[in-house]
């Protein structure tokens, strides 16, 4: 299979080339030249996640140098579960994606990307720099995934003071070839700086770069797997489509659900749960798409004012009217997030991170409006990463999973960086 740019001005490339490059030469995002239909009837709903992932992704890897190693990549990457758990409210479930080494859904894509990239041939005279902007969770997942992979270094940009204390600690705890830069600005500043670096051919001639943000196909494609896996399991039990509420900022996780549905898995509606950053809700309510400066919220990993993967969504649905028919997007403010965390704990004992609580709030809103069917809220991060937000609301400590506790026990350091591309460029050239 070949992959093309959303902007149509760069040549089509192989999957390996797309994964290595991250961003297309014309500044667009890579998308599959065609969508395969692997035949859901050929999947075993009781199979383990790595097996589902390998069968699902095989058509995307067809003809690529990595094709023969796909089974091994999936086995190496998906070493933790993605359980679908029943909630107390009827027909409501939660898809828990936080059981990986950094307690966030980003572990799935980051580990798959690392497992893929370490198998690709490349010039080893210089290390390949994985440049990543993070609004909270991506950077730690990428740092963990690449920390033991030789020939790579990771440079993480995050908005100083706009991630949780434990997220910040994770970002700076790896040391060695993992560099954390705390940027005096917003996530949008970080993302813009990263995109400028990829567009700078002179820099890339001196510092080989690749991406691990959700713009990377190596992260996006494997995220289809847990949607396909959970939807298959649900179909086997209930003979019903599974609808999802996806907390979203940069739209990567949600677009993975879109792709899983498009290739034939039993997925129904996909609702987008946003925080007070309203770019997507305003678009789906009928306004023109208009990126805005992001605002800081409790659900900080979704503090995005210019979601990169909207470009992929528009490629998939070029007609705006059709796109608006397909999806709904809702905005939830900090007061709604706090109320949801507190009330769900009091009513059922469930503890949700602020991002997951945003999706729970949206599902409650849908149910109040008469929405029926079977729904799953996507739990994107473990609540222990947001203890400073959650513990005052529920009146007790949140238990810290062992993997997260191990990272928090390490010393952490992050370098300050001005929110300008020249500052980033100088830093990248300094090593």
Image (tube, grey):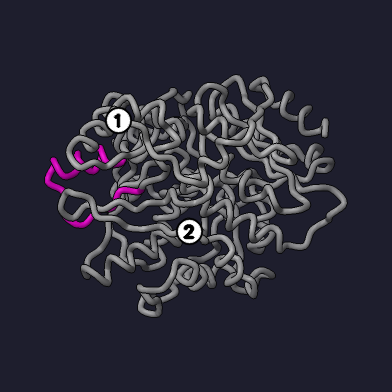
Which of the two discs, 2 and 1, labels the residue nearer the N terminus? 2
Q: Image height check: is 75 above or below 87?
A: below
Task: Left or right? Give the position of 312 relative to 426.
Answer: left
* Residue 363 is inside the magenta segment: yes
Q: Residue beneath label 1, please?
A: 337
Q: Residue at x 41, y 45 (%)?
A: 380
Mark 1: secondary structure: helix
Q: Where does the image place residue 379, in percent across and percent down from the top left? A: 36, 46
Alpha carbon separation for disc pair 2 and 1: 28 Å
Q: Position of residue 365 (x, y in %)?
A: 19, 39
Residue 326 visible in this rendered orientation of the protein: no
Q: Which residues are magenta?
A: 359-378
Q: Residue at x 44, y 30 (%)?
A: 300
Quadrant in which the C terminus is drawn = top right
Which residue is found at the position 37% from the left and 36% from the top?
398
- As helix, strand or loop, the secondary structure at mark 2 comes to loop
Q: Position of residue 137 (x, y in %)?
A: 51, 39
In the rendered structure, the answer to whether residue 92 lies left or right of residue 302 reads left
Residue 333 part of the magenta segment: no
Q: Residues within 10 Å of mark 2 (few under 14, many from 20)?
A: some
* Picture quadrant of residue 115: bottom right
The disc placed on residue 80 is 2
């Amino acid at each position: 299979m070949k992959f093309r740019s959303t902007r149509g001005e760069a040549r089509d490339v192989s999957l390996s080339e797309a994964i290595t490059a991250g961003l297309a030469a014309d500044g667009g995002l890579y998308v599959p030249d065609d969508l395969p239909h692997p035949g859901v009837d050929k999947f075993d709903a009781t199979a383990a996640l790595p097996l589902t992932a390998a069968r699902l992704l095989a058509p995307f890897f067809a003809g690529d140098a990595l094709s023969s190693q796909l089974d091994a990549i999936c086995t190496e990457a998906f070493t933790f579960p993605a359980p679908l758990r029943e909630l107390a409210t009827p027909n409501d479930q939660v898809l828990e994606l936080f059981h990986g080494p950094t307690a966030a859904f980003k572990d799935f894509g980051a580990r798959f990307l690392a497992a893929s990239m370490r198998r690709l041939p490349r010039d080893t005279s210089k290390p390949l720099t994985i440049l990543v902007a993070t609004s909270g969770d991506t950077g730690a997942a990428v740092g963990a995934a690449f920390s033991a992979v030789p020939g790579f270094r990771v440079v993480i940009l995050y908005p100083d003071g706009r991630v949780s204390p434990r997220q910040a600690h994770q970002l700076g705890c790896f040391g060695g070839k993992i560099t954390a830069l705390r940027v005096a600005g917003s996530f949008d500043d970080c993302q813009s700086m990263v995109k400028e670096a990829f567009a700078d051919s002179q820099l890339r001639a001196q510092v080989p770069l690749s991406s691990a943000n959700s713009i990377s196909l190596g992260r996006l494609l494997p995220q289809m797997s847990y949607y396909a896996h959970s939807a298959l399991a649900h179909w086997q039990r209930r003979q019903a489509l599974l609808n999802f509420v996806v907390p979203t900022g940069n739209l990567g996780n949600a677009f993975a659900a879109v792709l899983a549905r498009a290739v034939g898995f039993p997925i129904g509606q996909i609702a987008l749960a946003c925080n007070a950053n309203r770019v997507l809700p305003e678009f789906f309510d009928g306004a023109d798409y208009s990126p805005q400066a992001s605002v800081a919220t409790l659900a900080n990993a979704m503090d995005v004012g210019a979601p990169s993967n909207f470009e992929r969504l528009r490629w998939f649905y070029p007609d705006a009217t059709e796109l608006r028919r397909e999806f709904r997007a809702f905005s939830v403010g900090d007061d709604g997030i706090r109320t949801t965390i507190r009330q769900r704990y009091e009513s059922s004992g469930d503890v949700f991170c602020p991002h997951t609580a945003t999706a729970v709030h949206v599902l409650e809103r849908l149910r109040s409006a008469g929405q029926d069917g079977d729904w799953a809220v996507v739990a994107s991060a473990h609540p222990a990463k947001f203890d400073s937000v959650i513990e005052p609301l529920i009146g007790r400590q949140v238990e810290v999973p062992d993997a997260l506790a191990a990272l928090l026990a390490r010393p952490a350091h992050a370098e300050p960086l001005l929110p300008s591309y020249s500052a980033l460029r100088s830093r990248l050239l300094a090593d």
